[in-house]
Amino acid sequence: MSDKRSIFEEVGDAGGQKAAPVGGVIDQAPKGARRGIRIWLGVLFAMVVVMIAVGGLTRLTDSGLSITEWKPITGALPPMSAEAWDVEFEKYREIPEYQLQNKGMSLTEFKFIYWWEWGHRQLGRTIGLVWALGFLGFAVTRSIPTGWTRRLLWIGALGGLQGAIGWWMVASGLTGERLDVASYRLATHLGLAFVILGYIAWYVFLLGREERDLMQARRGKEGKLFSLSTGLLHATFIQILLGALVAGIDAGRTFTDWPLMAGGFFPPDAFGLVPWWTNFFENPGLVQFIHRMWGYLLLAFAIVLWRRARGSAHGTTRFAFNAVMAALSVQIVLGIFTVLYVAPWQLAILHQLMAVLIWVLILRARFLSFYPVVQSVRDMR
């Protein structure tokens, strides 16, 4: 005769033993995968920030055209002999930058700019290698959480595209039409670097919290703050591109008074180039004027958003928007001093790195608008 069963026993349980709860697909992912991928992406993030700084210094030292060929693999090795250095120097002597700007440059001076450009490219190769080894390692061990493979591949694809755009930029300075690279190509190159940085940062934020926590937090999404912060992110991206145009034609060293430009509100001869549309890319006065005006509009937009964010019910979200407002205020002051002191490399590179900080802070505030951190009354005391 079978044993009596309790009315509280689950139907289908063998011997009255409860089956262990089975988690979802996310819970079944290998332990440590999210943390390991987050650390890997954090390393890539730091390397991209360094890459942006090195790229800026390469531009400020006029080193970008010192290597006149694109050899993704064999170019990893620098000249190893005196003869090899002579060959590289001779190639540089054939381009307009040397003939019209640096004629008479010594081999020692050439080596200085060569090492800057070589270091910039080598760092790009290293970033690609770190991405490839990390992705393959996580893929082989099946440690990539569900839904993350495409995201991680997307980072690698953008990195490969960045290398091609980098050469597209350099090639514009080798054709004989100009001394330096085309400013709009420089802006494209820098803009894509910020896009890559943005995706990495967003993924790091996502991996910093469990999926169940994100799903729960999403119910408290502050839609208006999220929409406005998205708008601020786009407006900031435009300002970053405008800043690249300023750097590309050294417009920051052309008009060095503030708040006026050459004593007036609007710069003189702002549409002196033909055809007229080239002035928006190559006229120093007009390019710097647009950069200034967009900066004022960006500040006004940020103030409106910051005031609205003060009404958020979440302390972490309010603090995130406070940080954005503080960083943007510092950036405005830094930009003014950069102009007044004729854009020395120290201020110029600090101005660029502040743009990186603002970019990440806006992303962080935007993320917290979408996935707010709910605090208890005890935490808020």
Image: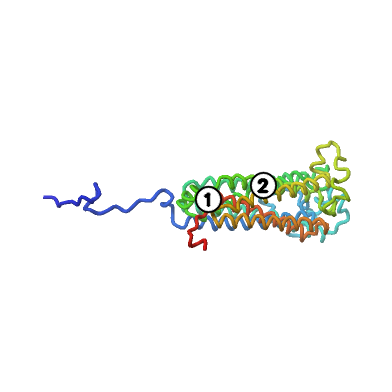
The quarter of the picture where residue 49 lies is bottom right
The amino acid type found where label 1 is placed reads Tyr
Horizontal placement of 56 versus 44: left or right? right
Horizontal placement of 107 versus 368: left or right? right
Residues 177 and 269: in front is 269
Q: Secondary structure at mark 2?
A: helix
Q: Which residue is mark 1?
A: 371
Q: What is the number of the mark on residue 67?
A: none
Q: Which residue is mark 2?
A: 192
Residues 201 and 113: in front is 201
Give the foreground label among 1 and 2: 1
Residue 335 seen by the camera: yes
Horizontal placement of 97 versus 192: left or right? right
Residue 118 seen by the camera: no
Horizontal placement of 191 versus 5: left or right? right
Outermost residue, top side:
275
- The residue located at (24%, 47%) in the rendering is 11
The amino acid type found where label 2 is placed reads Leu
- The residue located at (62%, 58%) in the rendering is 46
Question: CA separation, marks 1 and 2?
Answer: 26 Å
Residue 20 at x, y percent in the picture: 32, 53
Residue 85 at x, y percent in the picture: 78, 57
Residue 338 at x, y percent in the picture: 79, 57
Comes first in the chain, label 1 or label 2 = 2
Residue 74 at x, y percent in the picture: 68, 52
